Image (cartoon, coloured by chain):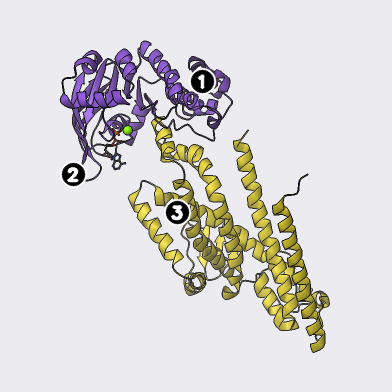
Chain colours: A yellow, B purple
Amino acid sequence: MKISYKEIIQALFALFLIILICVLINNISINLTRTGIGFSFNWLFRPASFALAEHPLPYSPSDSYAWALFMGWLNSLKVIIYSLLLATVIGVFIGLSRIGKNELLRVVSAGYITIIRQTPLLLQLMFWYFVAFLSLKETVLKPIGNLLSISNQGINFLGITLSAEFSSLLLGLSVFTSAYIAEVVRGGINSVDKGQWESFRSLGLNDFTGLYTIIIPQALPAILPGLTSQYLNLAKNSTLAIAVGYSDIYAINDTIINQTGRPIEGFIILLLSFLFLNLFISNGMEIINTMITSSKNN
Amino acid sequence: MLPIVKATNLTKSYAKGIRALDNISISVDPGEVLVVMGPSGSGKSTLIRTFNGLETFDSGQLNVLGIPLGSNHNEERKIRRIRKRVGMVFQQFNLFPHLSILENITLAPIKVQKKKRDEAEHEALVLLTQMGIESHAQKYPSQLSGGEQQRVAIARALALKPELLLFDEPTSALDPERVNEVLDAMRRLAEQGMSMVVVTHEVNFAKEVGDKVLFMDSGKVIETSTPDIFFLDAKHQRSRKFLNQIKKK
Ligand SMILES: Nc1ncnc2c1ncn2[C@@H]1O[C@H](COP(=O)(O)OP(=O)(O)O)[C@@H](O)[C@H]1O
Ligand SMILES: [Mg+2]
């Protein structure tokens, strides 16, 4: 095995970072001992003594802080995964509408992209929570009979209940991210040579078949990196959950820091949680990427 | 017999003022090879691309294989019916780079004609053998030379058993030593009675294979003659000037 010049530089840089972090941690712990608080994670196993509105696994206030944080992490994961899927579906649809033949869809999707990208996400989340859900008060909307009901308690779809907090975060993150995904999709498709369209059209294929057999496979290498970065943004943006009162990792961590007075340990946990989450997303995308490129070449 | 293509007073402008097609009337009979010549920008591509609906036109009539096309833009159905019966070969080959040679050819038979994969592959191999490139069936377009890619493109266009083939400068992107292998394949198709419209500046091909030469300039038909007359004694001053220019190259 040959070690390249680039790899040596990378290794040296990693070493430098590790040393820097060790120095930082050392400084912090010296300061902490001097102020008498100390640096410890023992509190993690003390009872949290606060209730959680949403917890995917059994949880009660007598459970530990660690367990509460884990619930927060699962709640984050849940809203991120659902939003990721929904944002992709909406984004691909809007992106395709943007370049499609239908004049009305083109104009509407262009407007959608502009409006969504030019208002802050926090504002959009507030809109979904306070305007779309809470303002319903006693009203229950049933747009498709008993399959779907929307109220200030959230959404009930085919017997699955989603709280108003979860729903507004889901919709806010999905709608916001979908506008960016739409642009990524449009850019990817436009990067494919126009001759490919003419070629499949002159073979009698319709645009839909041509799109998924010819255009999208060639657009994917251009789409995936942009998509990954939108997914990572979505994961980071999910910390705005606190604004609509959804118990994600950030919100729970915030409560815990207030209770325990240990912000440094709290933020270390938060940083590690997100590092882990985002590594999970980017590795997942990397796997999808290799799957696509290797299936193309055999 | 009904003509394969009949265009009457076709006119088209991309931008206001400049006519890419200016009142063009032509017809192509079954089994006929029409060679289209003219300087760059004279409207040759635009003309043959209207024949399979890749371009629309502003006024005039067009009838392809008995299917009338109007100048309105909502004829998706009719255009698809025409495309299933008309093959097209492009200057830049436009093969699908992510599909193997075999998949390039079987795509339309499978997706459009709903043929079984086995049957489509068998027919594709016959076509590749005709084109002399059956040994490349499992390769990808980027592994082939330009001449081989263009022969794949011809095989792909033939896969739907078209009644008319359109060629838009099929040898212009090729290295000179690769031109003949493509022209030879086209010549054999003509001998088998295929109706073809060929935009090309290959004089020898036009003389030997062409039944008629259509000369265009600035979107207009300047003259339509048999190759004998066009190359020896062109009627029009502009045709003669053009011929002198391509001889010099
Ligand atoms: N997509 C297009 N948009 C605008 N103008 C075009 C387009 N395609 C061709 N034209 C113009 O139409 C005229 C004819 O072009 P074309 O049919 O490509 O000529 P040729 O194939 O003989 O070189 C030229 O003036 C060209 O610039
Ligand atoms: Mg041209």
Name the quadrant where ligand 1 sits: top left
For this view, does A47 lie left or right of residue A211?
Answer: right
Residue A285, image x and y in percent? Answer: 63, 51
| Real-space Cα separation, disc 1 to disc 2, in angstroms | 46 Å
| Real-space Cα separation, disc 3 to disc 2, in angstroms | 36 Å
Viewer-nearest of discs 3 and 1: 1
Which residue carries the number 3 mark? A94
Which residue carries the number 2 mark? B17
The chain under label 1 reads B
In the image as oriented, which residue stretches furthest toward the front?
A: B248
Whether tag 3 and tag 2 are in contact, CB under 8 A, the answer is no
Q: Amino acid at mark 3?
A: Ile
In the image as oriented, which residue stretches furthest toward the bottom?
A: A35
Above or below, A137 against B127 in this view is below
Quarter residue A201 falls in: top left
Q: Nearer the viewer, residue A93 or B129?
A: B129
Say which element carries label 3: helix
Mark 3 surroundings within 10 Å by alpha-carbon count, few (fewer than 14), some (14 through 19), many (20 or more): many
**Is the same chain shared between marks 1 and 2?**
yes
The chain under label 3 reads A
In the image as oriented, which residue stretches furthest toward the top?
A: B191
For the N terminus of chain B, which image quadrant?
Answer: top left
Which residue carries the number 1 mark? B124
